[in-house]
Amino acid sequence: MTYIDVGRGDTVIRQGDAGDNFYCVDYGEYDVFVVDSIIGGSTKVAEVANGGSFGELALMYGSPRAATVTARTDGGLWALDRHAFRRVDRPCLSLPRVSEPGACVVRAVSMRRVGTWARGLVH
């Protein structure tokens, strides 16, 4: 995992780009926009703040980014790269209570206190 300082107005991910990281919000506020090719503009579809996460879809499905995420405020993010994401998420899919890929990563990774099991993932 890598810690990233983010400035107000920074674009974290851009719709259509290849997915490289899954992001967990340590602090700050982020807006999620989707470009609508029919109306020719972007629409704000979500907000993500402390404890939230984004970027898992491109990693789970090998598809381009589905949205653009920009920082509304200064903030900090924990980034988990594609390979580490798959190593953490794959064993969790066999657990009966975890029904959705990515859900385990969101629950398992504490951004303020990285557990002993995850220390090998931290760069």
Image (cartoon, rainbow, N blue to C red):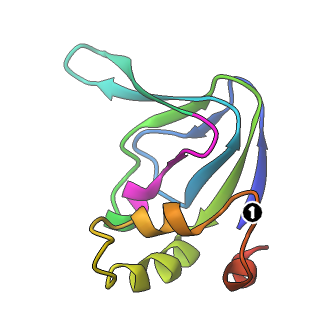
Q: Identify which residue is drawn at 68% across, 79% down.
A: 118
Q: Identify which residue is drawn at 59% across, 53% down.
A: 23
Residue 35 location (% of width, % of height): 34, 26
Question: Is the C terminus in the top left, top right, bottom left or bottom right quadrant?
Answer: bottom right
**Quick one: label 1, few (<14), some, or many (20+) residues within 10 Å?**
few
Q: Identify which residue is drawn at 55% across, 69% down.
A: 108
**What segment is highlighted magenta in the picture?**
49-59
Q: Within the magenta stretch, is there residue 54?
A: yes
Q: Identify which residue is drawn at 41% across, 80% down.
A: 92
* Number of numbered labels in the structure image: 1
Please state if 10 lies on the left or on the right of 102 as rendered. right
Please state if 76 lies on the left or on the right of 69 as rendered. right
Q: Amino acid at mark 1?
A: Thr
**Rendered position, 123 above or below 120:** above
Q: Residue furthest front?
A: 97
Quadrant housing residue 103: bottom left
Residue 101 location (% of width, % of height): 34, 67
Residue 15 location (% of width, % of height): 42, 39
Please state if 21 lies on the left or on the right of 39 as rendered. right
Question: Is the N terminus in the top left, top right, bottom left or bottom right quadrant?
Answer: bottom right
Residue that carries the numbered disc 1 in the rendered image:
2
Quadrant housing residue 94: bottom left
Residue 115 location (% of width, % of height): 71, 76
**Rendered position, 75 above or below 93:** above
Q: Within the magenta stretch, is there residue 85?
A: no
Secondary structure beneath dot 1 equals strand
Q: Residue furthest left?
A: 38
